[in-house]
């Protein structure tokens, strides 16, 4: 067993875990079952969460490809921790809803987290950049078109909000409320 | 008086389903945790065909945290055989299909033994301790070789690898003349072989099962498209009384036919749960899905089209070999039959013959995958129509126009014996041609050809139709399918006027909660938000035939309309009583009964619901309810159609294909929710393109699945697909009161031939006449090399 301390969606957990435990199974054992397992070769991206790197920057990671012990001392944000302080949908989640970017919804948590990371990196992406940025997340239902549309819409909404009130940015990954 | 409200049907309503899915508040089967629940892992065969010489689960039982372990031999007397509900011929060979293999394994991935443990990791670890010896047997892998003389048998002790041969002949059916007679009248014969590669449905959620045997009943949660059918099958196979079985399909992460199955894992988990007397969960890994969940397609199609020199088709003959794999699943033998009636597609002809042989091989069994039979048929006819056009040197659109059923010829009885109720192929085609700028593309193509451009341009056409809305029960019966094709709905108006709908359909991404709410809101004149839709739990929805074959709206939606009509009929005398008038003096619109000529006097459905709830003052002898159930059995299939056009650029030096434009004009009849319809079209097109360009399940010479993970079986990503340009024509179906046809499979059926036709069209001047799917750069490059040698 290895002792780890991980902050997940704003709550700090201290646990003893078998060293081979994958982060995704650790999260699911915590009850964070919004994060799902879609494959065993890290191809599908359904398990994607945000995890801070050593300098504190939140990055999308495939949590089936990270050991729980590697998350020691880090902050993890799952799709369940993405909503705004008042419990409303994160702008990316809302854009997915408004653009019918999900059908069965199984890939959605990972897709949303990757999109959040993508927009944090590149707030003004082209369609090709969105398609390239989502390449590691597979969806079998939508043909991706509405997902791409949703990510572009979230980017546009953020630009408009910033144009109206430059001082207040839309929430992005590093500003995810606890 | 109620204000005039915009009809719900036709509105692009955002989905009611989304919020939970977007925030991770979901109930996938793998999220279910029950007190005392144990975990199951399955040992699977590494051999394509072998005798199980010895199996000893004893060492696994001694591993930490292990509660039980057993093999097929231990449950041979009680496990029964998995069902095939479609014995397509009287003499079909129908071998036993034990959930756990007994004595012999017949494909890689077949379940052999299990371990039940406190946690999943312990169960998986303990599988390693099971001792098992196999004596290899010759494996049958090649579809054509399997039916040749002297080939080893897939099932030792059997007599043949041919499960059945099923024939349709227009001369025998009285729908036309014989193909021989038609050939005698013909000047052109085009004979082609097309290969439908094996595909894997690959919904994003792998399958999972939780079985709770406690509390004097059996509760089964399964990631399935068909909870109602699973319940009946559990009763038939286990002998457990049906009324003590509850099957729940909670949140289900996609299906595409892959979860239209009664699976070994459901019964294995049941057997384990019965043994230990505790709830047991099984969640498969993706690698297990790939080898044990059923596959799709895998057919060899020999197609012969005859025509006269003016381009008029005279006859069509199709000889099919269909790979069943090692066993027959719930509808395995019937999948080719769903295509049998569609090879003639939208075209008029005098003769048609279809002959299909279902063949056993030592591979994972095949069954329904999005479109099931119709994509294969559509591919073959749409490919061979292009070959006819090329032979006659006419435009592929023109050759279709000369042969298709004209709008004024509907209803039309086809050569395969179906009656197409409606359609307008000309309108959809004209719209698609305008949308893509067909003439400009042809001009660019000519210029590129003239300049010997390294990148050639092709335009692919697919003027598809399909049969869906499965299905009229009497036709299913005539085709020897064991069940019916009706669907059920219940509408309950609660005392406060809110409406609870129960549907027998079982959505897993299709948005039924939203669309059904729209239908009910219009019919009963209640707000969209006041309707809830319950489904997928046999305790709540006890009657239904579930979701597949683009049937949910065209059958289940009509049941819903009928139930709403009954509610209104039951409410009418209540309203008349409250308004002190005769029921026949009332008219119902926008949610209220009004006295003719006195529109200010009105009673809503909610008023009537409260009236029967209180029941203080009802007409003499009135049953105090306005709730209603309805079951709808369709008279006919529905026939969506459309024209898909694909502009593909092919790099003649690398074989790389770039889809530059993809235009789809679909006619799915009346549309309830355009947003959902568009989403279905997008996803359908993507899966059809995936068959054309990317996906193939490949076995090695020993029967190992080489494409056994998502690293090797290449589902397209966002970066692999173009933006689809979609539009619609709307020719309402005349066979149902909503005028709807179904849209779940149309995109997949249409797009595969559109893409391959585009690639072949680009390369035809080089002498390329076909490329076997998937058209990877290597295959395209090789086809070019072969043609230009």
Image: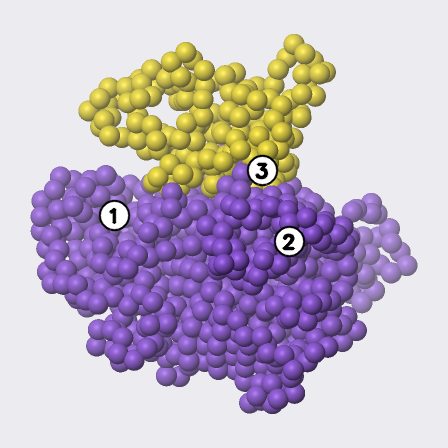
- Counting from the top left corner in percent of width and height, residue B184 is at 62, 89
The residue identified by callout 3 is A147
Report whether mark 3 lies on the same chain as mark 2: no
Residue in the picture at 24% in, 73% down: B152
The residue sitting at 64% across, 70% down in the picture is B391
Q: Which residue is mark 2?
A: B458
Height in image: B87 above or below B593?
below
Quarter occupied by residue B411: bottom right
Classify mark 2: helix, strand or loop. Answer: strand
- Above or below, A63 against B158 in this view is above
Image location (x, y in percent) of residue A22: 30, 31
Residue found at the very far right of the displayed protein: B597
- Residue B697: mark: none
Q: Are marks 3 and 2 in contact (CB under 8 Å)?
A: no
Q: The residue marked by circle 2 belongs to what chain?
A: B
Q: Nearer the viewer, mark 1 or mark 3?
A: 3
Label 1 marks a residue whose chain is B
* Number of the front mark, 1 or 2: 2
Chain represented in purple: B
Q: Are marks 1 and 3 on the same chain?
A: no
Q: Vertical placement of B33 versus B580: above or below?
A: above
Write down the colour of chain A. yellow
**Circle 3 sits in a helix, a strand or a loop, which is it?**
helix
Which residue is depicted at the point 21% across and 73% down? B156
Query: Mark 1 highlights which residue?
Result: B40
Image: B217 above or below B286: below
Q: Which structural element holds mark 1?
A: strand
Q: Are marks 1 and 2 on the same chain?
A: yes
Between the C-alphas of marks 1 and 2, the distance is: 52 Å
Side (left or right) of B285 relative to B730: left
User: Can the viewer see residue B628?
Assistant: no
Viewer-proximal residue among B542 and B144:
B144
């Amino acid at each position: 067993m290895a002792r780890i301390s991980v902050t997940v969606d704003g709550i700090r957990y201290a646990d003893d875990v078998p060293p081979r435990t994958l982060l995704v199974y650790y999260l699911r054992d915590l009850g964070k079952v919004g994060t799902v397992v879609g494959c065993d070769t890290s191809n599908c991206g359904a398990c994607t969460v945000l995890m801070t790197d050593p300098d504190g920057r939140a990055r999308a990671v495939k949590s089936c490809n990270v050991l729980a012990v590697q998350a020691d001392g880090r902050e993890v944000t799952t799709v369940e921790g993405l909503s705004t302080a008042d419990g409303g949908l994160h702008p990316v989640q809302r854009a997915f809803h408004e653009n019918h970017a999900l059908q069965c919804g199984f890939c959605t948590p990972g897709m949303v987290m990757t999109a959040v990371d993508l927009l944090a990196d590149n707030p003004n992406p082209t369609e090709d950049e969105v398609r390239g940025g989502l390449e590691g997340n597979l969806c079998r239902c939508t043909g991706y078109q509405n997902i791409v549309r949703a990510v572009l819409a979230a980017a546009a909404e953020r630009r408009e909000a910033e144009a109206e009130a430059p001082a207040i940015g839309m929430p992005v990954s590093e500003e995810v409320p606890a | 008086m109620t204000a005039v409200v915009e009809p719900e049907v036709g509105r692009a309503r955002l989905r009611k389903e989304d919020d939970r899915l977007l925030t991770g508040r979901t109930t996938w089967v793998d999220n279910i945790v029950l007190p005392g629940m144990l975990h199951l892992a399955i040992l699977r065969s590494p051999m394509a065909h072998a005798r199980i010489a010895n199996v000893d689960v004893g060492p696994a039982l001694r591993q930490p945290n292990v509660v039980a372990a057993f093999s097929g031999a231990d449950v041979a007397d009680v496990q029964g055989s998995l069902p095939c509900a479609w014995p397509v011929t009287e003499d079909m060979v129908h071998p036993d299909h034990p959930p756990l293999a007994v004595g012999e394994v017949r494909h890689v991935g077949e379940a052999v033994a299990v371990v039940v443990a406190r946690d999943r990791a312990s169960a998986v670890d303990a599988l390693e301790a099971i001792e098992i010896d196999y004596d290899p047997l010759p494996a049958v892998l090649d579809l054509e070789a399997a039916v040749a003389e002297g080939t080893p048998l897939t099932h030792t002790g059997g007599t043949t690898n041919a499960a059945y041969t099923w024939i349709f002949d227009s001369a025998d059916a009285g729908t036309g003349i014989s193909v021989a007679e038609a050939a005698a009248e013909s000047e052109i014969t085009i004979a082609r072989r097309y290969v439908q590669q094996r595909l894997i449905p690959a919904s994003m959620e792998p399958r999972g099962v939780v079985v709770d045997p406690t509390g004097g009943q059996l509760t089964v949660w399964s990631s399935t498209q068909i909870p109602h059918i699973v319940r009946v099958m559990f009763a038939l196979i286990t002998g457990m009384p049906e009324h003590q079985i509850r099957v729940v399909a909670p949140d289900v992460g996609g299906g595409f036919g892959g979860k239209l199955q009664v699976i070994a894992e459901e019964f294995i988990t049941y057997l384990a749960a019965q043994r230990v007397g505790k709830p047991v969960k099984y969640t498969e890994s993706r690698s297990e899905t790939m080898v044990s969940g059923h596959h799709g397609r895998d057919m060899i199609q020999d197609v012969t089209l005859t025509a006269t020199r003016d381009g008029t088709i005279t006859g069509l003959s199709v000889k099919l070999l269909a790979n069943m794999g090692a066993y027959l699943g719930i509808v395995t033998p019937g999948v080719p039959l769903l295509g049998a009636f569609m090879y003639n597609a939208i075209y008029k002809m005098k003769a048609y013959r279809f002959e299909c042989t279902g063949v056993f091989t030592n591979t994972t069994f095949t069954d329904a995958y999005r479109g099931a039979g119709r994509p294969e048929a559509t591919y073959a006819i749409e490919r061979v129509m292009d070959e006819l056009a090329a032979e006659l040197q006419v435009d592929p659109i023109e050759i279709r126009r000369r042969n298709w059923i004209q709008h004024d010829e509907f209803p039309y009885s086809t050569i395969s014996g179906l009656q197409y109720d409606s359609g307008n192929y000309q309108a959809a085609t004209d719209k698609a041609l305008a949308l893509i700028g067909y003439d400009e593309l042809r001009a660019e193509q000519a210029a590129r050809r003239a300049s010997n451009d390294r990148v050639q341009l092709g335009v692919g056409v697919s003027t598809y139709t399909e049969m869906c809305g499965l299905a009229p029960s009497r036709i299913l019966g005539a085709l020897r399918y064991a069940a019916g094709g009706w669907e059920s709905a219940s509408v309950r108006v609660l005392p406060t006027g809110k409406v609870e709908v129960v549907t027998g359909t079982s959505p897993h991404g299709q948005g039924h909660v939203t669309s059904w709410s729209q239908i009910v809101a219009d019919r009963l004149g209640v707000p969209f938000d006041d309707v809830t839709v319950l489904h997928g739990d046999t305790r709540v929805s006890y009657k239904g035939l579930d979701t597949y074959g683009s049937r949910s709206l065209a059958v289940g939606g009509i049941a819903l309309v009928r139930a709403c009509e009954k509610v209104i009929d039951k409410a009418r005398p209540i309203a008349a009583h409250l308004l002190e008038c005769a029921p026949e003096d009332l008219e119902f619109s926008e949610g209220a009964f009004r006295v003719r000529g006195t529109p200010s006097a009105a009673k809503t459905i909610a008023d009537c619901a409260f009236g029967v709830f209180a029941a203080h003052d009802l007409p003499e002898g009135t049953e105090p309810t306005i709730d209603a159930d309805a079951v709808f059995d369709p008279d006919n299939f529905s026939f969506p159609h459309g024209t898909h056009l694909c502009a593909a650029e092919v790099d003649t030096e690398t074989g790389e294909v770039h889809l530059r434009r993809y235009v789809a004009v679909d006619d799915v009849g009346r549309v309830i929710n355009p947003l959902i319809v568009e989403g279905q079209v997008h996803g359908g097109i993507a899966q059809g393109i995936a068959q054309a360009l990317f996906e193939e399940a490949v076995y090695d010479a020993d029967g190992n699945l080489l494409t056994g993970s998502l690293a090797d079986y290449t589902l397209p990503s966002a970066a692999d697909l173009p933006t689809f340009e979609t539009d619609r024509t709307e020719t309402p179906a005349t066979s149902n009161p909503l005028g709807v046809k179904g849209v779940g499979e149309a995109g997949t059926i249409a797009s595969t031939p559109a893409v391959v036709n585009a690639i072949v069209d680009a390369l035809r001047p080089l002498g390329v006449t076909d490329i076997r799917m998937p058209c990877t750069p290597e295959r395209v490059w090789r086809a070019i090399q072969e043609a230009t040698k």
